Image: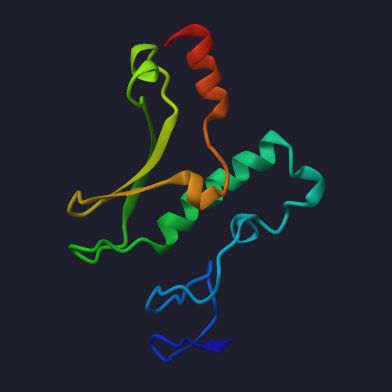
Amino acid sequence: MIECPWCHRTVEIQQGKCPECRQPLYEVSDRDFLSSEWTEDEAGDETAEAKCETNVEAMIENSFRCAKCRSEACIVKEVAMTGTGLSKLLDIQHHHYLFVSCAHCGSVEIYDPEVLRGQKPGELGTMLDILFGR
């Protein structure tokens, strides 16, 4: 338990934030998104990668609060988009984003999963786009 420097309440850190005011309490790293069952041996495993992706989305769902209506219910979806130039012509969708919609008012926030996960998401999907020209 620590005292939050933002709201001055005694709290237990949850996912790097104060559960009361949701302000960041320390530098967040990839370790914060990993479940306690994930070991170093699983670091390259696809299952472990899927757990990390799920944990990032779960982290957003757990800490979401709509800026407009203050509701805490949300829906998270990952969206892939083409860029400009050659990637647009070949329909290579290498830009990935997390769209978080408020379940109450419909307001949308957009997050960059590369920043949240610390890695480029959807590389397999991008390779399939290149090979098969989806």
In the displayed structure, does residue 92 sit left or right of residue 13?
left
Instruction: Give the position of the N terminus as an image quadrant.
Output: bottom right
Identify the residue at the far top of this view. Answer: 132
Q: Residue 105 location, x and y as percent?
A: 17, 53
42 versus 14 height, above or below:
above
Q: Image quarter for residue 12?
A: bottom right
Q: Residue 34 location, x and y as percent?
A: 64, 55
123 versus 108 height, above or below:
above
Which residue is at a point 78% across and 52% down the rendered structure image? 39
- Colour setup of the view: rainbow
Identify the residue at the far right of this view. Answer: 41
Which residue is at a point 55% across and 19% down the rendered structure image? 127
Q: Nearer the viewer, residue 40 or 35?
A: 40
Which residue is at a point 37% across and 78% down the rendered structure image? 21
Q: Residue 55 location, x and y as percent?
A: 55, 51
Identify the residue at the far front of this view. Answer: 85
- How many marks can you see? 0
Which residue is at a point 20% across and 51% down the rendered structure image? 107
Q: Residue 106 location, x and y as percent?
A: 20, 49
Instruction: Give the position of the C terminus as an image quadrant.
Output: top left
